[in-house]
Image (spheres, rainbow, N blue to C red):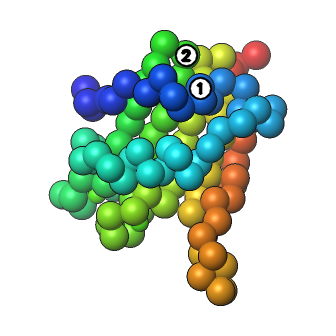
Amino acid sequence: MVESYLIPDWLPEPEGFASGAPFDPVSVAALADAVDPTADLDGDGTFDTVTWTSSSALVVATDLDADGSTDRLTAIADDGEFGVWEFHREPDGTPRWLRVDAGNLGPE
Ligand SMILES: [Ca+2]
Ligand SMILES: [Ca+2]
């Protein structure tokens, strides 16, 4: 069982984010960067992933290139709605979070 952090109260719950409700990847990534990763998603021996849970959602933050900054965020609500965001840097250096996937995991 992977250790999970509790989603703090000040963070908007990611429920409904796939339909455009606010989810702030910048805040979530900052949160992820501030704590120690608790899971090794790619199995290379270095912890790279932080997860949070609340009563209604699960958030997974991964540092893909092991530079200490989160590059990918996945949020899954308990109704199966999910969204995936990836960190990109514009040619001029401006950081940007792009939503790369969204949908619903539900079977129906
Ligand atoms: Ca790893
Ligand atoms: Ca990184």
Query: Which residue is found at the position 35% from the left and 43% from the top?
Result: 50
Residue 4 in the image, given as x and y percentages of width and height = 32, 29
83 or 104: nearer the viewer: 83
- In the picture of the structure, the residue carrying the numbered disc 2 is 56
Question: Dividing the picture into quarters, in which one does residue 92 lie?
Answer: bottom right
Task: Measure the alpha-carbon separation of dots 1 and 2.
Answer: 8 Å
Image quadrant of ligand 1 equals bottom left
Residue 40 seen in the current view: no
- For numbered disc 1, what is the local secondary structure? loop
42 horizontally vs 38: left or right: right
Say which residue label 1 marks.
13
Write the residue at 26% across / 30% down: 3
Instruction: Locate residue 74 relative to residue 33 in the image: left or right.
Output: right
Disc tally is 2
Q: Secondary structure at mark 2?
A: loop
Of tags 1 and 2, the one toward the viewer is 1
Q: Quadrant of residue 107?
A: top right
